Amino acid sequence: KLNSIIGYNGKYSLMNMIWNPEREFFGYTIGSILCIENLKTGKQKLLCSHNDDITVVCQRNDQNHMCSASAYSLFNSTNSSIADSTKSIQQESQQSQIIIWNCENFDIVANLVQKNASNITCMKYSTDDR
């Protein structure tokens, strides 16, 4: 039974939590951070490799790998005149980032970036883990 989660914003609430009963951890997103909680010890590990909010997480059926996805812009200007002049360029320069993690030690297996892609809101491994 889940009692509480500190820092969970629920912004992307469709597919942003995973549970791995084999390795006894629970994972959820906090903005651009993937928080992994060991269910035996209660200790948390924060995976901080995304540049923008994580929109979705999933894990392979064999529970050996998981992946998280986010989208971010190449232009992160705070100057409004620059932001206005680059608005059309910015819309064309969206990148989606998918990180594949090893579920044993939480090392990055792959960090994939797709240019000119919008937010990834749904992601799942096939039943044969391809």
Image (tube, helix red, strand yellow):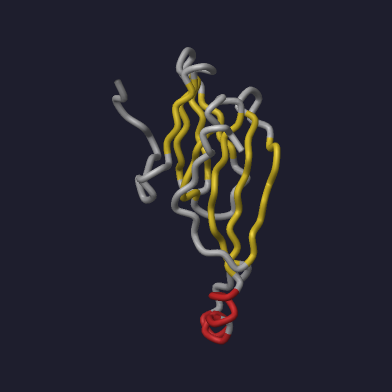
Of residues 60 and 36, the one nearer the viewer is 60
Of residues 79 and 40, the one nearer the viewer is 40
On screen, residue 100 versus residue 83, left or right, reads right
Residue drawn at the location 55% of the way across and 43% of the way down: 68
Query: What quarter of the picture does the C terminus occupy?
Result: top right
Whether residue 43 is situated above or below residue 31 in the rendered picture? above
**Can you name the residue that lies furthest to the top here?**
40
Whether residue 41 is situated above or below residue 117 in the rendered picture? above
Residue drawn at the location 55% of the way across and 25% of the way down: 63
Badge count: 0
Find residue 38 and report its horizontal and vertical position in percent.
Answer: 50, 20
On screen, residue 123 versus residue 107, left or right, reads left
Find residue 87 and report its horizontal and vertical position in percent.
Answer: 53, 81
**Can you name the residue that lies furthest to the front here?**
128
Find residue 102 and report its horizontal and vertical position in percent.
Answer: 65, 30
Residue drawn at the location 29% of the way across and 20% of the way down: 1
Residue drawn at the location 50% of the way across and 34% of the way down: 35
On screen, residue 26 versus residue 5, left or right, reads right
Whether residue 47 is situated above or below residue 79 in the rendered picture? above
